[in-house]
Image (cartoon, rainbow, N blue to C red):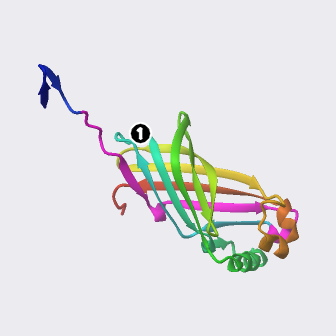
């Protein structure tokens, strides 16, 4: 405590932010592609991904989100062998098989709905990106996020390697659904 000119000044103390790491065995990322070409229609999941979130001092709101996904860990169902061959051949064409998202800000849109703005990096290219998510549960020890994304490929956004391998790719759309559990400590 500091006393100045008879006034008592108490330094403000803010609680430290809480960082939680992604618990891989309790989390999942699923994806699907809808296309006019049956060879491109697929559903699968990603096996390798990591991440962390930072919550405010009481653990009730997210202030930062980082995610890294190994794209070459994509797995398809056994009955999708043709798609699996296509997926592996397309992924093999890329020099980098990792996608990352790092937030620069997180905004609470309403209730449990959030929007993380930041940088998406893939193939050594940084792009501004927004990732909407829902905070299902938050506490200083454990938190759960859910992400649902949908999008369509266009001629201008489809990488040339994919268009060359599958011209119908530019008329396809896809989705990704993630249920992500984060924890301050290991969960057994």
Q: Residue 23: say if magenta.
A: yes
Q: How many marks?
A: 1
> Foreground: 38 or 18?
18
> Foreground: 1 or 145?
1
Q: Is residue 103 above or below residue 158?
A: above
Q: Specify start and end residues of the magenta stretch as a single range.
A: 12-40
- The picture quadrant where one finds residue 138 is top left
Q: Residue 134: say if magenta.
A: no
Q: In the image, what residue occupies the spot 68% across and 72% down? A: 76
* Residue 112 point in image, percent of width and height: 53, 38
Q: Which residue is mark 1?
A: 60
Q: In the image, what residue occupies the spot 36% across and 63% down? A: 188
How many neighbours does mark 1 have within 10 angstroms: few (below 14), some (14-19), or many (20 or more)? some
* Residue 56 point in image, percent of width and height: 39, 42
> Foreground: 172 or 23?
172
In the rendered structure, the answer to whether residue 126 lies left or right of residue 79 reads left
């Amino acid at each position: 405590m500091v006393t100045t000119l008879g006034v008592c000044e108490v330094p403000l103390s803010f609680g430290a932010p809480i960082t939680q790491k992604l618990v891989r065995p309790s989390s999942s990322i699923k994806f699907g592609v809808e296309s006019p070409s049956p060879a491109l229609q697929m559903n699968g999941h990603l096996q390798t991904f990591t991440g962390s979130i930072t919550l405010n001092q009481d653990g009730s709101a997210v202030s930062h989100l980082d995610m890294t996904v190994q794209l070459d860990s994509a797995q398809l169902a056994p009955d999708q062998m043709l798609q699996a061959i296509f997926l592996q051949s397309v992924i093999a064409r890329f020099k980098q098989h990792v996608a990352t998202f790092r937030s620069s800000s997180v905004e609470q849109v309403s209730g449990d709905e959030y929007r993380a703005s930041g940088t998406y990096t893939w193939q050594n290219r940084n792009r501004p990106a927004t990732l909407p998510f829902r905070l299902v549960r938050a506490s200083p020890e454990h938190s759960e996020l859910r992400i649902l994304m949908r999008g369509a490929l266009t001629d201008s956004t489809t990488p040339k390697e994919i268009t060359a391998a599958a011209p119908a790719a530019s008329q396809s759309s896809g989705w990704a659904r993630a249920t992500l559990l984060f924890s301050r400590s290991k969960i057994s």
